[in-house]
Each structure stands twice: as structure tokens, then as C-alpha cells.
């Protein structure tokens, strides 16, 4: 199975985890790490190492982070290899996609590609065309 680690600023990771559980159910091999104000970069790195160690029996791992270039991304990037993939700019759709399809014996690269496509497809602008009769 593919393990998932979520890392982000504030309560980003635990918030996404809560939403994933609500929509897709309880998840195995799924860890969220919040980079809260009280943590230093070194403490965050220790938390990521701990999560990697906890998921060491997974076939492979995907680490999701919130923003490119932020401390969670920069710290997680140190652990990327053929078995550990890193995706940034994460949204809920992406994590649900990975959570649902990771147990279907799909290739890690296929899961990553599908996850990124799902994230892009969910970004839309919603507009309403006003009619002439409407007052605002």
C-alpha cells in the first residue's frame, strides 16, 4: 500500500485529514503533520522523520504539502526518492484521489499523475450572469 503524509502550515494537514475521513472514511497509513507556530524547522524535520519511519513498511509514500518553497515543502523535499514522491499546492480533491486509489495496486507514478490532474480539474471560477432586471 502507498502511505500518505500531509504536511502544512497551521492546521492545514489535520484539517485536510479530518475532511478526508469524513468523505472517504478512516485511512490506514495516513499521517498529518501541522507546522504550528511553536515548532521550529528542526522540530518539523523530526516529525517528518518519525512519520517516514512509522510508514517504512509501505511500498511507497506520497508526501503532500501546502505551498511550494515553504518550510514543510523544503523539509519534505530532502526525502524524495524513487519510493517517496512529493506533491505541493495540495487541495482536498488531490488527497481524496490518492486515498481512494492507493489501495488498488496502481503504480505510484500513476497515482501521482492522477492526483495532480484531479487537483487541477477542481480549480474553477464560479460566476453568475446577472440579468438586466436584477438589482444589486
Image (tube, rainbow, N blue to C red):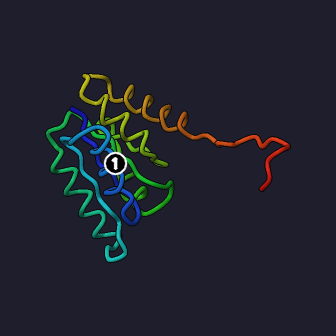
Which quadrant of the figure has residue 1?
top left
> Residue tagged by mark 1?
19
Q: Classify 7 as above or below 59.
A: below
Judge from the rendering whether residue 58 lies leftward or rightward of residue 40; answer left or right. left
**Mark 1 Cα within 10 Å, few/some/many (few <14, many 20+)?**
some
Name which residue lies at 45% across and 47% down.
Answer: 90
**Which one is nearer the viewer's eye here, 16 or 85?**
16
Q: Which residue is drawn at 42% across and 58% down?
A: 74
Quadrant of the frame with the C terminus = bottom right
Whole-percent x, y for residue 39 in the image:
31, 73
> Relative to residue 36, is residue 68 drawn left or right?
right
The quarter holding residue 86 reads top left
Q: Left of 8 or right of it: where is 123?
A: right
Instruction: Give the farthest residue toward the bottom.
Output: 38
> Tag count in the figure?
1
Q: Closer to the camera, 45 or 12?
A: 12
The structure residue drawn at horizontal position 30% and vertical position 52%, both measured from the top left corner, is: 18
In this rendering, is residue 40 above or below 61? below
Task: Report the side of 41 relative to 50 (left or right).
Answer: right
Q: Where is residue 56 in the image (x, y as percent from the top left)?
A: 16, 43
Residue visible at 49% across and 38% down in the picture: 119
Could you tell me residue 28's position as x and y percent? 18, 41
Task: Please tell me whether mark 1 sits on a helix, a strand or a loop.
Answer: helix
* Percent position of residue 125, x then y: 65, 43
Amino acid at each position: 500500500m502507498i502511505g500518505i503524509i500531509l504536511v502544512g502550515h497551521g492546521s492545514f494537514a489535520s484539517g485536510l485529514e479530518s475532511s478526508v475521513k469524513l468523505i472517504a472514511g478512516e485511512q490506514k497509513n495516513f499521517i498529518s503533520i501541522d507546522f504550528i507556530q511553536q515548532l521550529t524547522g528542526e522540530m518539523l524535520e523530526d516529525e517528518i522523520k518519525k512519520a517516514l519511519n512509522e510508514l517504512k513498511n509501505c511500498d511507497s509514500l506520497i508526501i503532500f504539502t501546502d505551498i511550494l518553497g515553504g518550510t514543510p515543502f523544503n523539509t519534505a523535499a530532502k526525502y524524495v526518492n524513487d519510493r517517496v514522491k512529493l506533491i505541493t499546492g495540495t487541495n482536498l480533491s488531490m488527497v481524496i484521489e490518492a486515498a481512494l486509489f492507493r489501495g488498488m495496486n496502481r503504480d505510484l507514478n500513476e497515482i501521482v499523475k492522477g492526483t495532480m490532474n484531479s487537483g487541477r480539474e477542481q480549480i474553477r471560477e464560479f460566476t453568475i450572469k446577472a440579468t438586466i432586471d436584477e438589482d444589486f
